[in-house]
């Protein structure tokens, strides 16, 4: 009989034998997550929004670890999710909703989108869609993630300079150009932050992550050097800060699903899709490092439950966070306990450090996000994509530009569609290698052209005196191959017998089957004989269901029938 703790290990991935490693991994991940959660909250919701990023890290991190399918994954607000929430805020502002968090109008609407997004993710997992989400071509993923990085960099230019900006990339840049009056105190804070996050020696950052180091050093310096009293005495503009933290910590708030429902529904779907892609890609990274195998569908359910609960508790939505997950695993985390410890540590910070967090300058968070944005951009692939494949490079850059200047979800959808069309075109060329219109295998070719045929089949083909056209197809035939088959129909009139060899075809799509049926019918209409050779298993069953005539077991049998037909 399986013991209780062994059963938990089998069902949920828990294993208390690694408790020390999980505790260390969870604490380390929390240290990294703290400044990032605050920064993502500020980026997503604007002034006053930083604390909601911390709420999201606590709730999503705990629930996704408890119910998810990637044992060592750490979840919380991420770059793509914060950019998406910022887009939701901009969409609601476009229909007349005030962006002021203090007014209380926009937050319930944003959280409604978060809850709906979580429910969509649960549905994806229940329907078993996890394995399909990770099939997104790398060129699309690379372009999308690089686009997210560009968006983060662009949106942080204003806060980095102490200039208030709102909206998307174009709106933010327009506001920046029209109101370019840098706050020198913010610039000084930004310079100090960037110096720390980029120049901290590795020996130090491996013990204290550079974002946290910036938070601990720059925040008190900003209070000492750029306190409101000091700046007012010198007639300078106050330094923008996070501001007052809501008292009481996590609290249930009923989202508003009634107002602007179409905008909220679309936003929820976008959050669900992007969160699913973000999480499952991180799951693949976790598998590679920890030598484990995640459960995609359960991971989606766990992430969905975490995001839905986060929306009810006014937390930002989250996803599997790559950097935090890698740090967790390298610090010893192996089971969901590490992700739960990470959330509990953040909860303790939330309950005890509210007054201190209120003094954090927004320029400091912008500096941290500049580093995040640069890290998200896929520099390696950007540099070499054009030398690998011009088509791949075009897809990647196209997705990048659509992500930055158009729409996140449409960028992914259009990118996947174009990438798949290019893939189908490439596969079709391979499938039709033996069906070149200007050079079909026939008995009047040279011996080298038919050298791949066995000697007895070659002899049969030579006896046909150039009256047989032999098409040889390879690989699974999709709808892309149907066009190539159809284009070669007119060649049938130049021969008395057509042999379509599908011995090396393991799978036959419906459209390709119809094309084969049309080719056989065209031969019959022109008083020609047609044979389909080599079909077996499911391929043969499909041909039989379609009623395709002239199906024979082997290519040799088809050649023998051709010789007999020509001798009549």
Image (cartoon, rainbow, N blue to C red):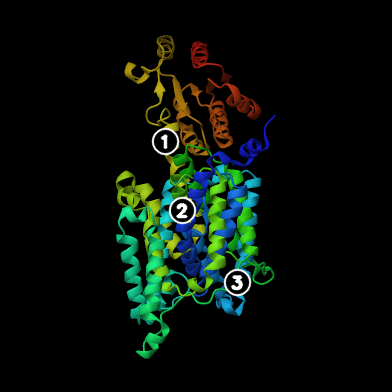
The label on residue 5 is none
**Residue 483 in sight from this viewpoint:** yes
Quarter of the rendering containing residue 251: bottom right
**Cα distance between the residues tagged 3 and 1:** 53 Å
How crowded is the residue under tag 1: few (<14 C-alpha within 10 Å), some, or many (20+)? Answer: some
Above or below, 104 relative to 401: below
Residue 204 lies left or right of residue 270; in this view the side is left
**Cα distance between the residues tagged 2 and 1:** 51 Å
How crowded is the residue under tag 3: few (<14 C-alpha within 10 Å), some, or many (20+)? Answer: many
Above or below, 429 relative to 550: below
Residue at which label 2 appears: 28
Q: How many marks?
A: 3
Q: Earlier in the sequence, mark 3 or mark 1?
A: 3
From the top left corner, tell me how far across and down residue 282 is, in percent: 48, 48
Q: Earlier in the sequence, mark 2 or mark 3?
A: 2
**Residue 272 in sight from this viewpoint:** no
Residue at which label 1 appears: 429
Element type at mark 2: helix
Residue 425 lies left or right of residue 187; in this view the side is right
Tell us which disc is closer to us: 2 or 3.
Answer: 2
**Cα distance between the residues tagged 2 and 3:** 31 Å
From the top left corner, tell me how far across and down residue 495 is, in percent: 45, 23
Q: Earlier in the sequence, mark 2 or mark 1?
A: 2
Residue at which label 3 appears: 107
Which of 300/522 is in front?
300
From the top left corner, tell me how far across and down residue 311 is, in percent: 62, 63
Which of 398/328 is in front?
328
């Amino acid at each position: 009989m399986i013991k209780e703790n062994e059963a938990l290990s089998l069902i949920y991935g828990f294993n208390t034998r690694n408790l020390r490693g999980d505790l260390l991994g969870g604490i380390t991940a929390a240290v990294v997550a703290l400044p990032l959660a605050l920064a993502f909250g500020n980026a997503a919701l604007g002034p006053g929004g930083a604390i909601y990023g911390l709420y999201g890290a606590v709730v999503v991190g705990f629930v996704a670890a408890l119910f998810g399918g990637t044992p060592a994954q750490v979840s919380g607000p991420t770059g793509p999710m914060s950019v998406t929430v910022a887009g939701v805020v901009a969409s609601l502002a476009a229909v007349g909703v005030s962006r002021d968090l203090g007014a209380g109008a926009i937050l319930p609407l944003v959280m409604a989108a978060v809850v709906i997004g979580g429910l969509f993710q649960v549905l994806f997992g229940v329907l078993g869609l996890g394995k399909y989400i990770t099939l997104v071509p790398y060129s699309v993923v690379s372009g999308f993630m690089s686009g997210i990085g560009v968006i983060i960099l662009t949106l942080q230019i204003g806060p980095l300079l102490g200039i208030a900006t709102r909206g998307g990339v174009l709106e933010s840049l327009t506001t920046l150009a029209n109101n370019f009056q840098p706050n020198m105190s913010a610039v000084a804070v930004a310079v100090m932050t960037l110096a720390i996050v980029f120049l901290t020696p590795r020996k130090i950052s491996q013990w204290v992550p550079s974002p946290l180091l910036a938070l601990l050093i720059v925040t008190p310096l900003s209070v000492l050097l750029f306190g409101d009293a000091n700046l007012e005495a010198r007639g300078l503009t106050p330094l923008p800060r996070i501001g007052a933290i809501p008292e009481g910590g996590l609290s249930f708030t009923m989202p508003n699903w009634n107002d602007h429902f179409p905008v909220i529904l679309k936003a929820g779907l976008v959050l669900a899709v992007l969160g699913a892609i973000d999480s499952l890609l991180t799951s693949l990274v976790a598998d590679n490092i920890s030598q484990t195998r995640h459960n995609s569908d359960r991971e989606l359910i766990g992430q969905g439950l975490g995001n839905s609960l986060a929306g009810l508790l006014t937390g930002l939505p989250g996803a599997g966070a790559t950097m935090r997950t890698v740090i967790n695993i390298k610090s010893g985390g192996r089971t969901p306990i590490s992700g739960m410890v990470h959330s509990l540590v953040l909860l303790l910070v939330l309950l005890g450090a509210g007054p201190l967090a209120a003094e954090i300058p927004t320029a400091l968070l912008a500096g941290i996000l500049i580093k995040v944005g640069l890290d998200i951009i896929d520099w390696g692939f950007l540099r070499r994509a054009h030398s690998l494949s011009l088509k791949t490079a075009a897809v990647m850059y196209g997705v990048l530009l659509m992500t930055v200047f158009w729409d996140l979800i449409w960028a992914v959808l259009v990118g996947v569609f174009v990438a798949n069309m290019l893939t189908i075109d490439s596969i079709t060329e391979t499938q039709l290698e033996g069906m070149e219109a200007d050079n079909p295998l026939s008995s009047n070719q040279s011996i080298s052209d038919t050298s791949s045929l066995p000697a007895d089949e070659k002899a049969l083909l030579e006896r046909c005196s150039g009256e047989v056209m032999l098409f040889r197809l390879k690989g699974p035939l999709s709808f892309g191959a149907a066009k190539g088959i159809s284009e070669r129909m007119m060649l049938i009139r130049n021969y008395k017998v057509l042999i379509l060899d599908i011995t090396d075809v393991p799978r036959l799509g419906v459209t390709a089957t119809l094309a084969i049926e049309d080719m056989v019918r065209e031969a019959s209409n022109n008083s020609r004989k047609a044979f389909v050779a080599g079909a077996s298993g499911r391929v043969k069953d499909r041909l039989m269901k379609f009623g395709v005539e002239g199906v024979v077991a082997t290519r040799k049998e088809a050649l023998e029938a051709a010789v007999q037909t020509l001798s009549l």
